[in-house]
Amino acid sequence: MQLYNTMTHRKETFVPIEPGKVRMYSCGPTVYNYFHIGNARPFIVFDVLRRFLEYIGYDVTFVQNFTDVDDKIINRAHEENCTAKEIADKYIAEYFKDADALGIHRASVHPRVSDTIPEIIDMVKTLVDKGFAYNVDGNVYYRVEKFPRYGCLSGQNIEDLEAGARIDVNDEKESPLDFAVWKKAKPGEPYWDSPWGKGRPGWHIECSAMSRKFLGKTIDIHGGGQDLIFPHHENEIAQSEGANGCTFAHYWVHNGYININNEKMSKSKGNFFTVRDIAKKYDLEVVRMFMLMAHYRSPVNFSDDLLNQAKNALERLYTAKFQMQYLLTRCEDKAQSEDEKAWCDHLSAYNQRFIDAMNDDLNTADAISAMFELVRDANSTLNENSAKASVEAALKLFNQLSEVLGLATKNKEEKEGSLEDEIEALIAKRQAARKAKDFATADAIRDDLAKRGIVLEDTRDGVKWHKA
């Protein structure tokens, strides 16, 4: 397998530390709100990478953390007059609801910062003892100049960073580049006792400590969004290698950005969408399909047109799957002809094309194309006169590949149930628009449903719908 390594700026053959085993870490959400569509991309990408590694025979230990100690969580708790833990607990539960709808499997471990405080304090203490960090009145900072490789991941040069940095008046840091690994407690914030007084972890140190706790000092793959390369992942390297005295991660894998209608997503521009917002209009499996139809390192443009293309593509996969399931109930359990045996042997070519695509730096777009080639062949070859074994062989392969991508994995009952939920949600949105006299939105929803073969009838008992 070839993976693009951000550290070396090239594709490299993946060779794990321990044969047959993979240790992988990916940065998870800061749990103060529902996660947005930009967050969803790395969650999906590294879920698929983990699934594929397992498909080709690796035993994968995958760690994805929850940041449950953070300024944003504390501020949200103050706004809602509750504790930071209550905010974190709430949005961790909401994360799993949206992650489940996106088809994201649970990680092997989902550690929280608040449960890893002893390990964080131990790592900070090691950094202080080795001279990589220093205490100033309860605040502990990492001494960047002590780590000569700083900038190795992002390509940043320390001299250039220093030239562009600004030193605040009365700044207690030795250098403006130094960053906090432990913060002195402020009134109204959660805190823990430490050798430097009451305080809480800095942002970057948590991932270094959690990765070491659950995966060891050196891991195979560290993943995340492109936005985390600097300073978060750069700082993780400095902390981990400073404390542990060895390489932190062998492969650094980062996904590209998401734009909304050709513009960068921004709350100020009004184009900021949470996954929960999108779920009001689309089944989130459509969002997963949309993400995987592009290469993970490429920037993608999020728009209704592209979502509808993904929706249509997903429907074609489901149609093929349900057709094969139907044929299983109609075909005879008879001996295969020689031609059928040869055709079944030929199916392995689609599996190989799929594996070749995924081995080429997780090229999910080409992997999906291989699935569609399988579907076209099955549609043109299989019928009610086929031997049952032929249908079973094609469906088995389809299900194997769909499970790797996390696409078209629902059964017919689940799929129809999710369609009904989606239609009912759109009808409710249409009713709200009509009540607000927003007839343009109401008509657009009705037209969209009509294109999908759904007919609405406004009756005395409310809105009824049926398939055309």
Image: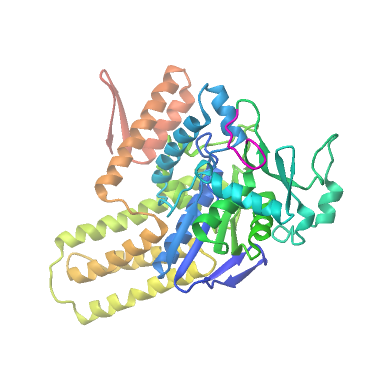
Rendering quarter of residue 327: bottom left
Residue for point 24% across, 79% down: 341
Q: Compared to 253, does 468 lie above or below?
A: above
Residue 206 appearing in the image: no
The x and y percentages for residue 94 are 43, 37
The x and y percentages for residue 352 are 41, 74
* Residue 440 sits inside the magenta stretch: no
- In the rendered image, the quadrant that contains the C terminus is top left
Q: Compared to 395, does 90 lie above or below?
A: above
Rendering quarter of residue 340: bottom left
Q: Main secondary structure of the magenta part?
A: loop
Stretch in magenta: 189-198
Q: Nearer the viewer, residue 458 or 297?
A: 297
The x and y percentages for residue 403 are 36, 59
* Residue 197 sits inside the magenta stretch: yes
The x and y percentages for residue 211 are 54, 55
Q: Nearer the viewer, residue 378 or 35?
A: 35
Q: Compared to 99, does 247 lie above or below?
A: below
Residue for point 43% across, 28% down: 443
Q: Nearer the viewer, residue 450 or 61?
A: 61
Residue for point 48% across, 21% down: 438
Please identify the residue farthest to the front as the structure is shown. 195
Q: How is the image coloured?
A: rainbow
Residue for point 49% across, 32% down: 85
Rendering quarter of residue 221: bottom right
